[in-house]
Image (spheres, grey):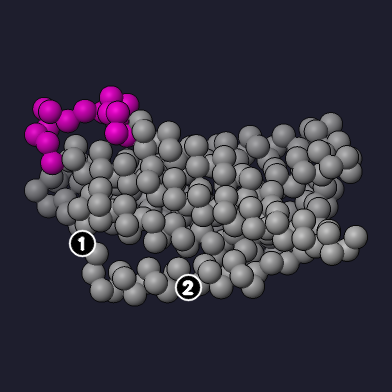
């Protein structure tokens, strides 16, 4: 009985790893298709440029990115964050590949070394990172989220994001005012928006995990978490931050 249970847990863990890698693959492809649109559009004459909403390439890219979140959600329900976070570095490998093929970026020896290191690290996490995790109903999650250190961290992170966003907008305005000397401010704005996208992406990981835990507890018959109003704060916040993440991503490109 215990061996069968362990086998089922390991099988669920293996499926979670596969779903996480598939999500990274599709997400990287979608992001690079969006980058391809922005790259090609930037090199057109100003009068020939089009909105992203009019581009089929961009639409396919954003569609793949959103679709990849389905597999990410499945992985969140099967794996602990401590395993999922390192596995997300597989996205760096896929990003490097697709950027080379779709956007025409160079792939240097340093990129190769970094890609191999990420691949080895992800493999080691996949092999040795399996740990048993307890289910987290709503009350347990609220207790964890209400810890003073976590509250301080979230408030501090929010203030950092607001400061970075203000600085990025300031650089964007410098670009619009002085087109001839826009390389520096444009690079800084793009870099800051990329950082903001990374921070918001990590927040969606946490919120997605909270949502999947509540759904799992409900489906396993351990208590209907959907009857609590506080349960719905998680998916609403997740949706809002997910939209912000997409906005930051596209403004960084």
Which residue shows up at 32% across the image and 57% down it? Answer: 97
| Horizontal side, residue 17 vs residue 90: left or right | right
Most distant residue in the top direction = 54
Residue 229: tell me if it is visible. yes
| Horizontal side, residue 217 vs residue 40: left or right | right
Which residue shows up at 12% across the image and 36% down it? Answer: 44
| Horizontal side, residue 165 vs residue 124: left or right | left
Mark number for residue 210?
A: none
Q: Give the quarter of the image for residue 37.
A: top left
Q: Which residue is mark 1?
A: 106
Front position in the image: 31 or 157: 31
Q: 10 Å neighbourhood of mark 1: few (<14), some, or many (≥20)? A: few
Q: Which residues are magenta?
A: 43-58
Secondary structure beneath disc 1? loop
Front position in the image: 190 or 178: 190
Foreground tag (2 vs 1):
2
Queried whether the magenta region covers residue 51, the answer comes back as yes
Which residue shows up at 59% across the image and 57% down it? Answer: 17
Q: Quadrant of the N terminus?
A: bottom right
Q: Give the quarter of the image for residue 214.
A: top right
Q: CA distance from mark 2 to mark 1?
A: 22 Å
């Amino acid at each position: 009985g215990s061996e069968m249970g362990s086998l089922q847990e390991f099988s669920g863990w293996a499926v979670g790893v596969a779903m996480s890698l598939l999500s990274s693959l599709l997400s990287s492809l979608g992001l690079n298709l969006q980058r391809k649109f922005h790259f090609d559009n930037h090199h057109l004459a100003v009068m020939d440029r089009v909105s992203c909403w009019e581009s089929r390439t961009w639409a396919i890219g954003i569609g793949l990115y959103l679709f990849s979140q389905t597999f990410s959600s499945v992985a969140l329900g099967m794996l602990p964050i401590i395993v999922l976070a390192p596995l997300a570095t597989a996205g760096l490998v896929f990003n490097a590949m697709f950027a080379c093929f779709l956007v025409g970026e160079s792939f240097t020896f340093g990129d190769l070394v970094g890609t191999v290191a990420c691949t080895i690290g992800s493999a080691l996490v996949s092999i040795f990172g399996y740990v048993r995790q307890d289910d987290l109903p709503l009350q347990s999650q609220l207790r964890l989220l209400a810890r003073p250190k976590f509250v301080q961290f979230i408030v501090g992170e929010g203030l950092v994001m607001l400061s970075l966003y203000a600085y990025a907008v300031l650089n964007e305005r410098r670009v619009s005012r002085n087109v001839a000397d826009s390389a520096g401010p444009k690079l800084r704005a793009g870099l800051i928006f990329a950082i903001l996208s990374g921070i918001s992406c990590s927040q969606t990981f946490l919120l997605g995990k909270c949502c999947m835990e509540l759904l799992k507890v409900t489906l396993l018959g351990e208590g209907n978490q959907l009857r609590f109003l506080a349960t719905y704060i998680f998916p609403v916040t997740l949706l809002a931050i997910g939209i912000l993440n997409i906005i930051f991503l596209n403004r960084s490109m």
